Image: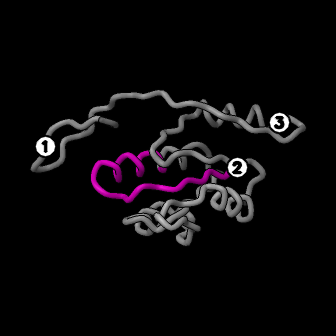
């Protein structure tokens, strides 16, 4: 089917909620979808254990600590269990139309690169106990 891979920000505060929601939406695409999370940011190991996601904690970084995306792509190709790989930012929700698009395009006889863009959706988040009111997906 499909291997999705990403690299997160630290799982802290509202970013943790957004990233967790995104990862869970990916798992719901199809039972055969495999997820790989690259990086050892705060909270990543716990989320990977909880959701059953493969974590690759050691990622090549430059002197400022920025991850080399090329090394993440190379490693994903090495360890992916499916022929179709997809990098997705860790805060993007994927819906069933994404799966249908991948299924359709993966029938092509040649290699392909598929690119897309996001839709920005303002979503009020549930109040937390002791809470601060509604939050939005991005500010």
The answer to whether residue 2 is magenta is yes
| Pair 3/2: label in front | 2
Marks 1 and 2, the one that precedes in the sequence: 2
Residue that appears at 47% across and 60% down: 51
The label number, if any, that marks residue 85 in the structure image: 2
The label number, if any, that marks residue 132 in the structure image: 1
Question: Which stretch is magenta?
Answer: 1-23
Q: Position of residue 119 (x, y in %)?
A: 48, 27
Q: Quadrant of residue 10?
A: bottom left
Which of the two residues, 63 or 106, is positioned nearer the viewer here?
Answer: 63
The label number, if any, that marks residue 23 in the structure image: none
- Relative to 46, does residue 95 appear above or below in the rendering? above
- The residue indicated by pointer 3 is 107
Residue that appears at 42% across and 49% down: 19
| Pair 3/1: label in front | 1
Residue that appears at 12% across and 46% down: 131
Which of the two residues, 33 or 39, is positioned nearer the viewer here?
Answer: 39
Residue that appears at 45% across and 44% down: 91
Q: Position of residue 94 (x, y in %)?
A: 53, 38
As measured in the structure, the alpha-carbon distance from the residue carrying label 1 to the one carrying label 2 is 39 Å
As measured in the structure, the alpha-carbon distance from the residue carrying label 3 to the one carrying label 2 is 14 Å
Q: Secondary structure at mark 3?
A: loop
- Which quadrant holds the C terminus? top left
Q: Is residue 123 left or right of residue 29?
A: left
Q: Secondary structure at mark 2?
A: strand
Badge 3 local density, few (<14 within 10 Å), some, or many (20+)? Answer: few
């Amino acid at each position: 089917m499909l291997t999705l891979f990403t690299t997160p920000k630290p799982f802290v505060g509202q970013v943790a909620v957004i990233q967790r929601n995104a990862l869970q939406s990916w798992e719901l695409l199809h039972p055969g979808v495999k997820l790989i999370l690259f990086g050892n940011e705060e909270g990543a190991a716990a989320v990977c254990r909880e959701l059953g996601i493969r974590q690759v904690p050691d990622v090549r970084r430059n002197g400022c600590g920025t991850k080399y995306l090329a090394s993440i792509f190379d490693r994903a190709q090495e360890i992916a269990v499916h022929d179709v790989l997809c990098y997705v930012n860790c805060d993007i929700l994927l819906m069933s139309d994404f799966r249908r698009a991948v299924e359709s395009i993966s029938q092509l006889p040649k290699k392909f690169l598929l690119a897309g863009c996001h839709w920005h959706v303002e979503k009020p988040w549930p109040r937390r106990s002791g809470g601060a009111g509604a939050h939005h997906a991005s500010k």
